[in-house]
Image: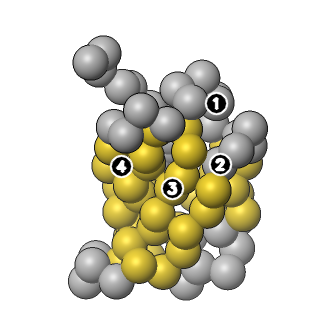
Amino acid sequence: MPILLLSIPTLQKNTINFEQNHNLEKVNFYSLYGKLVLSQNLQQRNTINISQLNTGMYILEFKTKRGAFVSKRMIKE
């Protein structure tokens, strides 16, 4: 299985923009306490609205159509 590299800036305000070249299927946002706070299907999307999230740090878990997972940290301003 190839290594999946996903580049997302750490500091975000209201939207996350990324390249949709990894066949991404879904992204889950978790608080640092492990609580799922947002889940988005990514069918052909390259922008996620995060304006409803509170300021703080989140763990993003991306899932590809092949079942691979990638986790990234993000700080919401």
Q: Tell me the amino acid under the disc marked 4.
A: Lys
State the residue at coordinates (35%, 49%): 72
Q: Amino acid at mark 3?
A: Val
Measure the C-alpha gap from mark 1 to mark 4.
16 Å
Label located before the other in sequence (4 or 2): 2
Tell me if label 1 and label 2 are in contact, CB under 8 Å. yes
Q: CA distance from mark 3 to mark 1?
A: 12 Å
Of residues 11 and 23, the one nearer the viewer is: 23
Of the 4 image quadrants, the one containing the C terminus is: bottom right
Residue that label 2 marks: 42
- Which circle marks residue 20 in the picture? 1
Q: Which residue is mark 4?
A: 72
Q: What mark, if any, has residue 27 been given in the picture?
A: 3
Q: Amino acid at mark 1?
A: Gln
* Cα separation between marks 4 and 2: 16 Å
> Which residue is situated farthest in the front direction here?
66
Q: CA distance from mark 1 to mark 2?
A: 9 Å
Q: Residue at x 54, y 74 (%)?
A: 38
In the rendered image of this protein, does residue 50 appear above or below residue 23?
below
Residue for point 70% across, 73% down: 51
Q: Earlier in the sequence, mark 1 or mark 2?
A: 1
Q: Inspect the image, locate mark 2, and give the three-letter code of the amino acid beneath it.
A: Leu
Badge 4 density bin: few <14, some 14–19, many ≥20, Cα 10 Å = some
Q: Is residue 68 above or below residue 22?
A: below
